[in-house]
Image (cartoon, rainbow, N blue to C red):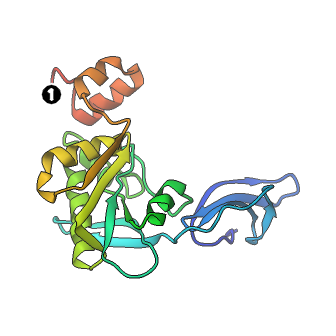
Amino acid sequence: TAIEHPEGQVEWAQVRPDGAVWCRHSSGASAPRILDEAGGEVLSLEGEPAPAGRPFELLRFDNRHGQSVQGFLVTPAGSGPWPILIRPHGGPTWLDEDKWHPEVQSYVDAGLAVVLVNYRGSTGRGAEWRDTLVGDVGGPELEDLNDALDHLVAAGIADPERAVVGGWSWGGYLTLMMLGKHPERNWRCGIAGVPVGDYVLSYEDMSPLLQAYDRALLGGEPKDVP
């Protein structure tokens, strides 16, 4: 039976002892709520509710290879071009969704547009899309992020002279890669949160599980594929 819910993300759902279904729903513009199968709120948090955010707009553009790339755009009120934050997600096998994201909303409150790109290597588009990075980390992602910026500049949404790149974990790694490989973009700044800064050193310090993941992603140990 289809469950009614507003646009956004259902992060979790369970069947109650009485047979009802409750789910945890949020969107870019609305904080998490517990809803029933009819879409009604059934469990309210105590205290003052979080203020509404700016909505996540679905974004689609073709990259330089003619592939359709999906993501989300969040903008302040009014019309652009705005200063723009390119915010690559972590993982890399992860994805951005239309869900509650206070960090993104804080940047929008400060007057920036924010773009979230499900670059090649993200989940949600099948194994071939996800595995594009195998043996070529930092390549396809940067192409898709730069193509997203070019698309938004051409559309009059982003100001290329006021562009910022920043992310966490793999997003931080991509931030450092972007600043190093594409300085011609004249980035105003880059914000790299807990990034991979030295892959050889980090490999030696990783757990066996993460080492196995890196060998699968890179095609071998750092000493084998320098």
Q: Which of the 4 quarters of the picture holds residue 133?
A: top left
Identified at 38% across, 82% down, the residue is 79
Using the image as rendered, state which of residue 28 and residue 191 is in the foreground.
Answer: 191
Q: In the rendered view of the protein, which quadrant contains the N terminus?
A: bottom right
> Residue 36: image x %, image y %?
77, 65
- Residue farthest toward the bottom in the current orientation of the protein: 79
Residue on which the image places disc 1: 225
Is disc 1 placed on a helix, strand or loop?
loop
Is residue 67 at all visible to an observer of this figure?
Answer: no
Identified at 34% across, 24% down, the residue is 211
- Residue farthest toward the top in the current orientation of the protein: 204
Q: Count of labels shown? A: 1
Identified at 88% across, 56% down, the residue is 18
Please say if 223 is above or below 197: above
Identity of the amino acid at label 1?
A: Val
Q: Is residue 67 left or right of residue 92?
A: left
Identified at 29% across, 23% down, the residue is 203
Circle 1 crowding by C-alpha within 10 Å: few under 14, some 14–19, many from 20:
few
Q: Is residue 182 left or right of residue 41?
A: left
Please say if 20 is above or below 170: below
